[in-house]
């Protein structure tokens, strides 16, 4: 069967690329011919410009910020080149690129099934409402349309968008979402059942991910920080662990003037495969990212996750589902915890993985 995946393949975001690979890999393991529809949407790409001046109102302070941004361009160029390399290595992109739904209609795609997901493809804040591309609304009547682990990325949908969401979701043959909030938002408004499934990265086991890991790129023992939003408590917690255990601190992300030291190393040019490598070989991980949390669990690491606001409901749902609620922290002193029982975690994860894979198999077929 020929399957086309519709997700955020064009963004320079670790989680976006890696989850797309995981879904593609799982579908291929069932013998399907799987392609990633190469979506090059301007709205997605504008957040990853080498130099984004959108929010700059020039003043003495902003000029300093501007110069700081300019200094980051060389690292961003290298990182973006690595992303392009890894994306073309990991994903089976279509030969043609598509920028609008009109181009997808004119493209006359011949796939048997379109899988929408995963990632925040239904987030109303990204496209100012639902984007019909991510409901495969261009497909012909004889082509199946399903969603897998689609995320709305917000706690509630603006009521002005609900009618359009319901219309597009009702056109899908099978529906699954990643978070319970999305199910609660739509279930009573649509005709089909909505399933809650795991993010695609959990469809692959540790040993499957390990096949992508090469030689350790950071030679010393280290605690890893992966931080999507600045959090001083998170940095302080990592510092406390580092001092107590004499571990180096490694950070995936751009350099910060406020967090430096002889024992701190930034990986500002890491690509997706570097990302996996740094997680795989770390001793402990401190993060406020969903996919940072996910790979800490997959690679069975000591994890400290900061998830203290409503934006992190998906992290909290995941941790509670796997009985890891005590690994959610909110203080720099909250690191005196016992070992994680990954035998128990993997058993719970195995149950959820089986249900998610069963949904995908039935929906595709």
Image (tube, rainbow, N blue to C red):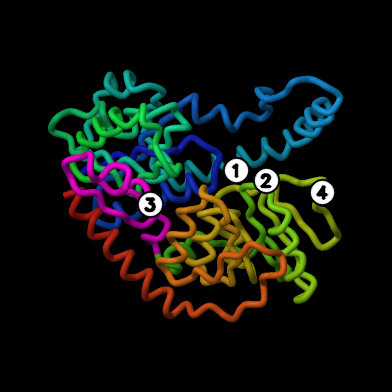
Cα separation between marks 3 and 2: 31 Å
- The answer to whether the residue labelled 3 contacts the one labelled 1, judged by CB atoms less than 8 Å apart, is no
Of residues 288 and 5, the one nearer the viewer is: 288
Q: What's the residue at 51%, 52% (across, down)?
A: 312
Tell me the SS state at disc 4. Answer: loop
Q: Which residues are magenta?
A: 175-204
Which residue is the site of mark 2? Answer: 269
Tell me the SS state at disc 1. Answer: helix
Judged left or right of residue 46, residue 333 is right
Which residue is the site of mark 4? Answer: 258
- The answer to whether the residue labelled 2 contacts the one labelled 4, judged by CB atoms less than 8 Å apart, is no
Tell me the SS state at disc 3. Answer: loop
Quarter of the N terminus within the rendering: top left
Which residue is the site of mark 1? Answer: 82
Reply yes or no: does residue 92 show up in magenta: no
- The crowding category of the residue bearing disc 1, from other C-alpha atoms within 10 Å (few below 14, some 14 to 19, many at least 20), is some
């Amino acid at each position: 069967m020929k399957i086309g995946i519709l997700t955020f393949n064009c963004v320079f975001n670790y989680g976006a690329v890696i989850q797309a690979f995981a879904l593609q890999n799982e579908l291929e393991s069932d013998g399907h011919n799987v392609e990633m529809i190469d979506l090059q949407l301007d709205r997605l790409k504008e957040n990853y410009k080498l130099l984004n001046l959108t929010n700059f109102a020039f003043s003495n302070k902003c000029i300093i910020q501007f110069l700081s941004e300019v200094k980051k361009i060389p690292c961003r160029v290298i990182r973006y080149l690595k992303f392009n390399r890894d994306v073309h290595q990991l994903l089976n992109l279509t030969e043609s690129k598509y920028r609008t739904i009109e181009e997808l209609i004119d493209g006359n795609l011949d796939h048997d099934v379109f899988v929408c997901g995963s990632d925040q493809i239904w987030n109303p804040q990204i496209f100012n409402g639902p984007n019909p591309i991510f409901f495969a609304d261009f497909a012909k009547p004889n082509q199946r349309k399903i969603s897998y682990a689609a995320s709305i990325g917000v706690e509630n949908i603006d009521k002005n968008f609900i009618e359009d969401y319901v219309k597009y979701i009702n056109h899908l043959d099978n529906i699954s979402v990643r978070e319970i909030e999305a199910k609660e938002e739509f279930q009573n408004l649509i005709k089909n059942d909505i399933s809650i499934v795991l993010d695609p990265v959990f469809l692959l086991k540790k040993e499957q991910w390990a096949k992508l890991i090469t030689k350790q790129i950071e030679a010393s023992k280290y605690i890893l920080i992966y931080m999507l939003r600045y959090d001083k408590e998170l940095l302080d917690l990592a510092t406390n662990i580092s001092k107590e255990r004499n571990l180096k601190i490694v950070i995936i992300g751009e350099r910060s003037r406020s967090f430096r030291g002889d024992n701190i190393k930034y990986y500002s040019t890491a690509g997706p495969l570097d990302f996996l490598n740094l997680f795989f070989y770390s001793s402990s991980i401190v993060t406020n990212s969903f996919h940072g949390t996910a790979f800490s669990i997959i690679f069975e690491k000591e994890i400290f996750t900061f998830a203290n606001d409503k934006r992190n409901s998906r992290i909290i749902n995941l941790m509670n589902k796997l009985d890891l609620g005590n690994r959610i922290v909110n203080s720099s002193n909250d690191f005196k915890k016992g070992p994680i029982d990954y035998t128990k975690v993997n058993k719970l994860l195995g149950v959820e993985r089986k249900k998610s894979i069963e949904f995908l198999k039935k929906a595709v077929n």
